[in-house]
Image (cartoon, coloured by chain):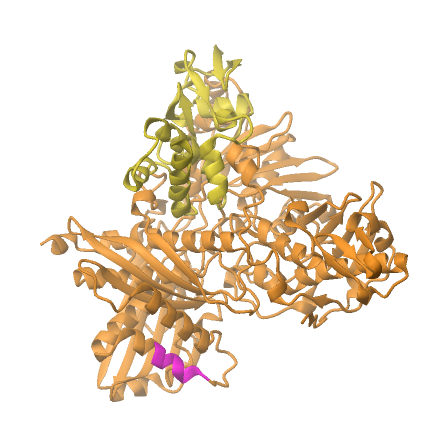
Amino acid sequence: MAVRSNNKFSRRSFLKVTGLAGGGVLIGFNLFSACKSDTEMPKDISELNFNDFNAYIKIADNGKVTIFSPNPEIGQGVKTSMPMIIAEELDVAWEDVYVQQAPLDTEKYVRQVAGGSQSIRASWEPLRQTGASARQMLINAAAAGWDVDPGECTTSNGVITGPGGNRIGYGEVVKDAAGLEVPEEVSLKDPKDFKIIGKDIRNVDINKIITGKPLYGLDYSEEGMLIASVLRPPAFGQELADFQKLENFDAIKKDHPGVVDIIRFENKIAVLAKDTWTAMKAKKTLQANWQYAGNPESTEDHDEILLGLLDGNDFQNMRKDGDVEKAFSEADEVLERTYESPFLPHNCMEPMNFFANVTDEKIHLVGPIQTPEGTANQVAEKLGRPLEEVHLEMTRMGGGFGRRLYGDFVLEAAEISSLAKKPVKVVYSREDDMTAGVYRPAIKYRIKAAVKDGKLTGYHLKEAAVNSNMYNLIPNFFPAGAVENYQVDVANYQSNITTGAWRAPYTNFLAFAEQSFFDELAEVMQVDRVQLHLDLLEKVKGSTDDRIQYSPERMQNVIKTVVEKSGFKNQQEGVYKGFSAYYCHNTHVAEVAEVVLENGQPVTKKVTCVVDCGIVVNRLGALNQIEGGIVDGVGHAMYGDLTFTDGKPESDNFHNYQLIRMMQAPKVETHFIENNLSPTGLGEPTLPVAGGAVANAIKAATGQRIYKQPFIKHLDTKEVIG
Amino acid sequence: MPEYNLNVNGQSFTVEAAADTPVLWVLRDHLRLVGTKYGCGIGQCGACTIHLDGKAQRSCLTPVSSVENAKITTIEGLSEDGSHPVQVAWKEADAPQCGYCQAGQIMTASSFLRENPAPSNEEIRKAMHGNICRCAAYNRIEKAVAMASEKLT
């Protein structure tokens, strides 16, 4: 049975249909705030609205369909999965669909953002309605031509079939359809009739990727374009004291033919050259003097300050149920632990870069950015130009992980082009990328639990973080609702080191802290670790607290399934297992990691993962996100570490910053919970769970509890070997 | 500036560049063959991997002055149309996420499989260890190399 669309917005006012001169029709939606639902996003990008979407379909006379994918592609797969949703309801064969990246157009597409794992969740319904509305209009056009009731017509693979054996292709009725009224209500497919959704669909850019076609920002070029390599303050807290351009310039030009200009702007100096190597090489020879304007901060300072905050009383309360202090004073046992994490760079494989050509008429920007609209606004404001003059084109991104939410490098490109009056592409070297970052901030958590009569009676989570604190949905994650006396408090320290969202902000570390804590708590309580989690979830069932974000039923289901699929309770000689379960980004996940000892070192061999993300839109893409998220989570928990001395990052390239590689990557086995619930995102939610699973498995293997990331630095390997 | 005669993907080119210019930037900036990627510039990530006389090499550490007598193959020249068994396997496995490191991964894998067409999983993991994938699509990459090996044997 087909489901009626719940028609939350007036389609009549927002659907635009335009006949095209060259044949075909465009169907556009401005899907606006009426479809808004609660979203989850980090505080510092809270001005972004992930719910506003727009999509375009273009149907040519020959029946071929072009679907414009509205959102930036950073490797999360939306350029494939979002068009799949439209194509499903439009009822065309996937082979007849071309996918194109939509340009930034705030009139037509309203909001175009990649972040928070929200693309699929927020656009599921609107994209289905887009496809279904277009299909209905095509049917209406065919029915009118045949003089029959549209209700008697069906569609399949882009062909409309009517009574009496009438058949006509979409391409033959598009022009008529373009002139019709927009249907007030449309039927959506029953999920059991899906032909595209739930299938294995390959990345739409796969042919270009495997043959090395230009796709990324770094691949973009224009005639006369110069490459800008920028010298920035070597340490946070420093500014440019003096720079003798002329003396430098003559020497540099002589030694480096191809250097065209040297431009000082703000606290930076840009070398402009005809090619990248010359620009990067010449930049290294710049003689500039720097001075501290702010505090030179070191990792030891941060550690001391954050621990001081945890010991102090200067907190902001984020949630308070019952009375935790009373619970602690009446407890039979109290467990308190502190968990510590370092700063992390994003290290996108494609270093930051952007093209800008600022002329009197317009500002042309091309490159990889997760927040094209916000960035276009910032550029307009910075250069004091009207927004209409800014034209921004999105390229595929060589990774994002949150770094490309921030358009600092776009502003640099625009500013340099404006000063040089030339088309310019700013290209970061790997060293620039790692040392001029917008890092995952260092964070410390202290968790304290009260146990009385064998029950968990109190739970107090404190956060001390650099620059900003957890976003306000997090205190309503597990175990909120499961413990009578529950409190979450946060404190922060303002640093001059730039920080921001990093894949699964806050939860990427908090999940490790919490799931390690519960492992230890179960030990203290002398209860089964999984049963403790299940019992706590049981208490949340039927809760009337509408702040609670997770579903206890769905969480129990993923937990029970992972225990079964991984054989968590079966003993295996020499294999040590660790359990972890977490909800974030609207998706419920449970993981079991398997660790073995090789030469006394714990090595993660396998992670079994169970995910409840509702309907799986693109199975092949979903599995890739899950596998990548888990291996990334294991890698950063094990090795990720950026330390500072006097404001200067102590790592600057991959010889002194370790990323996980093939031989360290565990095998990932994934199981989905099958249901017909609306889909949720997968770019982030499997990552936070992994650190806890590995830490708990390492405890099982070595007897050591790890409280700090990266594990490699804090694991006493001598003790293991001995 | 000196001139260099290069053989890239079976074609001859003359480029004018400083002698220490890495082949990576000659390919990308001078010849506009942008399939070869810049990742680290110090031979740590493998995104810039090309073949020199059929052998995988880091183009970011190879100065243009050293390759005049070598046959350079880039991802664009591995096959005319993406039909090299490694490329086909990559597609079938749907290996990429962001895709940026994949040309380097493919060039490493194709050189490795030429030497060792039927490797064990352990040998695959060892051979691919030098190529970083920041999206951590290592499970898929390993699978793609194994699939390519089947096509080759």
Identify the main secondary structure in magenta: helix
Determine the residue positioned at 73% across, 43% down: A389
- Residue A603: x and y in percent read 24, 52
In the rendered image, the vertical position of residue A189 relative to residue A244, given as above or below: below
Near-viewer residue (B65 or A472): B65
Determine the residue positioned at 45% across, 59% down: A504
In the figure, the shade used to draw chain B is yellow
- Residue B109: x and y in percent read 39, 33
Q: Is residue B48 left or right of residue A48?
A: left
Q: Residue A577 magenta-drawn?
A: no
Q: Is residue A699 left or right of residue A511?
A: left
Q: Quadrant of residue A412?
A: top right
Q: Is residue A266 visible?
A: yes
Near-viewer residue (B108 or A436): B108
In the rendered image, the vertical position of residue A283 relative to residue B146, given as above or below: above
In the figure, the shade used to draw chain A is orange
- The N terminus of chain A - image quarter: bottom right
Q: Which residues are magenta?
A: A534-541
Question: What is the residue that sits farthest to the front in this orientation?
Answer: A164
- Residue A262: x and y in percent read 53, 28
Question: What is the residue that sits farthest to the left in this orientation?
Answer: A722
Q: Is residue A27 left or right of residue A512?
A: right
